[in-house]
Image: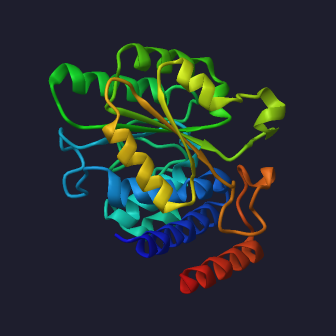
Amino acid sequence: MNKKELEKKANEIRQSIVTAVHAAKSGHPGGSLSAADMFTYLYFEEMNIDPKKPDDPDRDRFVLSKGHTAPGLYSTLAARGYFPASDLEKLRHTDFYLQGHPDMKHTPGVDMSSGSLGQGLSAGVGMALAAKIDGKSYRTYVLCGDGEIQEGQIWEAMMFAGAKKLDNLVVIIDNNGLQIDGKVEDVCSPYPIDKKAEAFNFHVININGHDFDEIASAFKEAKETKGMPTAIIMHTIKGKGVSFMEDKVGWHGKAPNDEEYATAMEELKKAGEAI
């Protein structure tokens, strides 16, 4: 896909995120929207995957460590062909396979169940280590939240990944600056994130997480980095794409009402037409 096609696809995914959360009357739109461009690039450009063979042992792995942004992952998986997009409107319904957090046992394309913050990276590190032990070439990608990295287990996993030189692992940190209780710097500042990751023997790349050229360049650099894992710190806007949600902490975990939904969809559709 070229840049315009990726931008259009990301816009469609944002529309699906808003639609799913509105239909569920609950969920987490803010962090799903901030990561929509990254989800798009991973699933349409970067990762070696095949929706027809979701359990291919040689596929690249993805772990959504910030599991509450499942609407973003599900919308991307649907766009990629893992399941019908119409199913997104049953998000969080009882006994349906698209629950509020990813479930690897029931949802096609989900490589790891997640939701308890801080734990997904450890699972991803295990996948990367397994590939090394088994002599496999697949790569593992883990998406963490910037509030999530306040969890100590994140740094235990990073210490291990750095010590074991897992150059087949890419940790992506969605640095949108907000978590459920406010600004990450006010709750428990993780800054400077890049210097901390470097201290744990990671190759670090800072990017604008809404710029596909920068995203593409970062993954190319990650593949060329040998002997150490890579951390991509993507600077993003929470709620990106919906004006009244952008950089507003209140949209961390709240569904739009009917009027807000109509406004959001009108904005996104206009933005899509303008690309």
4 in relation to 230, above or below: below
| Quadrant position of residue 268 | bottom right
Of residues 4 and 31, the one nearer the viewer is 4
Q: In the visual, does 232 lie left or right of 223?
A: right
Q: Is residue 26 left or right of residue 10?
A: right
- Taking the image as drawn, is residue 104 in sight? no
In this image, 9 relative to 253: left or right?
Answer: left
57 and 4: which one is in front?
A: 4
What residue sits 59% from the left and 82% below the top?
A: 269
> What residue appears at the point 61 percent right and 17 percent down from the top-left corner?
152
| On screen, residue 83 above or below 120 | below
Q: Position of residue 250 (x, y in %)?
A: 80, 52
Could one spot residue 89 in this view of the protein? yes
Q: Quadrant of residue 22?
A: bottom right
> Which x, y percent locates residue 46?
34, 53
Q: Is residue 80 above or below residue 64?
A: below
Q: Is residue 114 above or below residue 247?
A: above
